[in-house]
Image: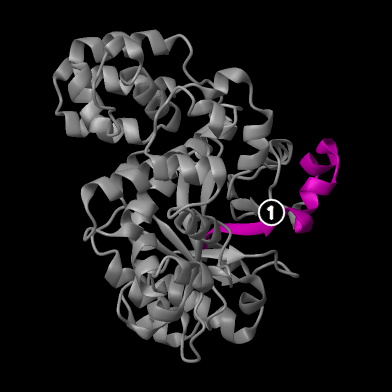
Amino acid sequence: MSTALFQHALFGYEPIVDRQRNALAMRVSVAAREANATMATLYAEFAAHRAGAGGTLALRSEAPIGEDLLALEALPELWIEVPAWFVSTETGSALVARLHAAGFPMLLGGRPDTPLPAELVPAFRMSIIHVDDDRRLHKGLLQAMQLQPEVKRSIPHVNEGVRTIAMMERCFERGAVAVVGWPTEDALQHGGKANSNPSYATIVEMMGMIDRGDDPIAIEKVIRRDAALAYKLLRYINSPGFGLSVEVQSFRHAVMMLGYARLKRWCALLLATACKDSNLRPAMVASFRRGIFLEHLIGAGQDEQLRDEVFILGVLSLLDRLLKRPFDELFRNLHVPERVRETLVERRGPYMPYLRVVESIEHGPDPQLPERLDDCVMSLAQCNQAVMRALTAPDLLAA
C-alpha cells in the first residue's frame, strides 16, 4: 500500500453482527485526510488490495461520493455506505439509482427525514440507524408492533450505538437484523462463570480433526481462534505433571508434544464445561482478530518467535475479562512469554505500544493513532496494510 491515500488514512473497524452472533460484514471507517480523496479512490484501493480475499467489507467515509465510482467494477463483497442526507438530495438520489443499476452493493447510513422513493428502496441491502434515532426503540412493544404503514420499514435495518446486551436484545426484538459492533464490555461483565470456557463447537471441530488425523498445523489454526481454549492448552501442557524441561509457548508445539490420543482425551474433558453463552462469541472472535492483526503488524520480516508472541498477546488480551480473573492470577500457573506477561499484567514493556495501536483501530478512526504508531516505529501505511490482511484472513473468516 504505497499510495498517498493509504499512507495518510486513518482506519477503524467493527463487525456487523446478526442475531446468531455471526459477522455479516466488517464495517471499515476511513478518515482519508487527503484533499483529493473520494469514495471512488477509496473503493479502488480496497478492491486492489483485497484481490481474491474472502469476507465482506462495508466502506464508510466522509469522502465525497461521485460519478467517478461508475468507472469502477462493482464487487459483491465490497459495500458502500451512503449517508441518508446525500440520498435525500436530487443529485444523490439520481447517483444512487445509477450505482444500483451498475451493481454496487450499498448500505443506507442514517434515517432519512422523509421516506425514500419506492424505486430507491431496492438499492440498499440494509439501513444503519443509531439507537438514539430509532423510533421503534423508544416506544412500548405493542406500539412498535402497531406502527402505521407509513413508518413501516421496507429496508432491513441495523442498529449502531449499542452499548449493552439489554439494548442489543431490544434491537433484535424490535426487528433489527444486526447490530454494528458488539457490547463486548457489557457481555464480559455480566457473563456467567461457564462463559470462561472454550466454545463447544470449537472442541467438537477439533476432536473431528484428531479423528481424521489432520495435520497439526490445521489443528493449531482452530486453537488460535478460541482464547479460552488456547489458555487452557498452554496451562495444561506446561503443568508439573508433564515434567517438561522447556516451557511450551507455541500452540503447534503443544499439539505435537501432547499427541493426538492425549489431546482428544483432554478435549473430551472440556466438553462438559464448554461455553454456552453465544453473547461471548463475538468477544472471543475479537481477541482472535487482535492476534491476527498484531501478527500482520509485526510483519513477515520478523522472526517466528516474535510473531508468535504478539499473536499470543492479542489472543490473551481479553482473557482477564473472559475468565473474570486478573492477569497476574491467570499467569501464576501459566508461564507466557515474559514480554506478553509484562504487557498484560503491568501495562508496560516493548509490546505495550502495539496493544495501544489495536485499541485505537477498534475505536477508530482515532486521531491518536499516528502518535501511537510512532511509538512502534511504524507508518500508517504498514498499519493499514495489516488491517486489510487481518480483516480478510482465512482463519479469521472461519471463526
Q: Quadrant of residue 42?
A: bottom left
Q: What crowding class fits label 1: few (fewer than 14 Cα within 10 Å), some (14-19), or many (20 or more)?
A: some
Could you say where residue 77 lies in the image, as x and y percent from the top left?
36, 59
Q: Tell me which residue sits at (67%, 76%) in the image.
A: 85
Q: Quadrant of residue 230?
A: top left
The range drawn in magenta is 124-147
Q: Quadrant of the C terminus?
A: top left
Circle 1: element type: loop
Is residue 89 placed above or below 269 in the rendered structure?
A: below
| Residue 263: image location, x then y, percent | 26, 15
Could you tell me which residue is drawn at 45 percent across and 37 percent down?
316
Mark 1, residue position: 161
The answer to whether residue 114 is above or below residue 331 is below
Question: Is 397 one of the magenta-colored residues?
Answer: no
Name which residue lies at 39% across and 46% down. 291
Q: Is residue 394 visible?
A: no
At x 58%, y 50%, the residue is: 181
